[in-house]
Amino acid sequence: MARIVSREARFETRSARSADEWMRTLGSLYSPPTISMTRSHRFRAEIRSLTVGEVVVCETRATPHRVGRAFLQPTAPRPDTVIGIVQLEGEGYAAQGSRRSVVGHGDIVVFDMAMPHETLYRDEVRLLHFVMPKRLMPRSLIARSAGSRIAADQRANRMATDFFAGIADNLEILSGSGGPRVIHSAVELLETILASDNEADPAAWDGDLLAQVRLYIMQHLADPSLSAELVAREHQVSLRHLQYLFAGEGTTISGLIRSKRLERCRLDMLEPTLANVPIQRIARRWGYLDPTHFGRAFRAAYGVGPREYRAARLSLER
């Protein structure tokens, strides 16, 4: 884990009496405020936060509510943030990707904030959030853990619940000189718990990693720099291992990127509302900066050039 270098800690308390006010508060903590919530006339919440360098630790108390993030547009900024949530009181439901969990006292769930996710709390809850940049934790570990429930009685988590509850109880005290050291230890403990939980089934790791990589590719198709090397680096796994996993699926990383980009271009070219948009602009939108390269790739995939394909298909619909 990258070390938390700050020696200073800042303590704050905020409250909200409406879902809209709470959404703005969470948005200021969780990067871009693209958070949706259920509306409640009697909603109330309070958050006590301690900021140590790039890490924010929050104790949250709130009445029943739902909070989540849907898919982002290809051009939208993506928060490079991970959040670990310790359930101190109440019960909740957590979901990210294909993972769905009921979360109870002492359980932990982790979210990759760049990915769609949802939490639902039907009771009043008390939570401890660890909000931090992804670079403070191995991305491969985040990919394996995102959306999964780590039970309170599971391995390394068994003795951690009281420690995390103690942090929540003493956030204001931790704003003193010893606070950064304690928070650094807490983040290290969180990473240890996640790593311990992921030791059991390497095959499941690989399956989850493939799912995360596929989702990452789909969300970054518009980025011209998207490549197999970038994907491996972003998920902190070796390129050779990732290529091995994709070979087992009968494809390659570069092949998947190419086929998905071409498919997006093909669909856009057939969209009547985009009939007047030049093909070159559509290609650029999906990461093809070189028209010649795009034309060759399209012809190899569909047997005809993009102009001929578009003209033939659109003429059939007239």
Image (cartoon, grey):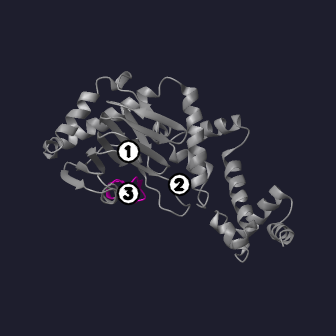
Number of other residues with Cα within 10 Å of mark 2, as a class: few under 14, some 14 to 19, many 20 or more: few
- Please identify the residue farthest to the bottom as the structure is shown: 276
User: Who's the residue at 69% across and 75% down the image?
Assistant: 277
Number of other residues with Cα within 10 Å of mark 1, as a class: few under 14, some 14 to 19, many 20 or more: many
Callout 3–callout 1 Cβ contact below 8 Å: no
Does residue 52 appear in the picture of this structure?
Answer: no
Dot 1 lies on which element?
strand
> Looking at the rendering, which quadrant does residue 149 occupy?
top left
Where residue 5 appears, x then y in whole percent? 26, 47
Please name the amino acid that badge 2 sits on: Phe
Left or right of 77 on screen, residue 24: left
Classify 67 as above or below 314: above
Where residue 42 appears, x then y in whole percent? 29, 52
Disc number lying in front (2 or 3):
2
Looking at this view, is 302 or 254 the one in front?
Answer: 302
Measure the C-alpha gap from mark 1 to mark 2. 17 Å
Where residue 200 appears, x then y in whole percent? 49, 23
Residue picked out by circle 3: 31
Dot 3 lies on which element?
loop
Residue picked out by circle 2: 71
Residue 30 in magenta stretch: yes
Measure the C-alpha gap from mark 3 to mark 1. 11 Å
Residue picked out by circle 1: 83
Quarter of the rendering occupied by the C terminus: bottom right
Does residue 164 appear in the picture of this structure?
Answer: yes
User: Who's the residue at 44% across and 39% down the image?
Assistant: 94
Classify 118 as above or below 145: below
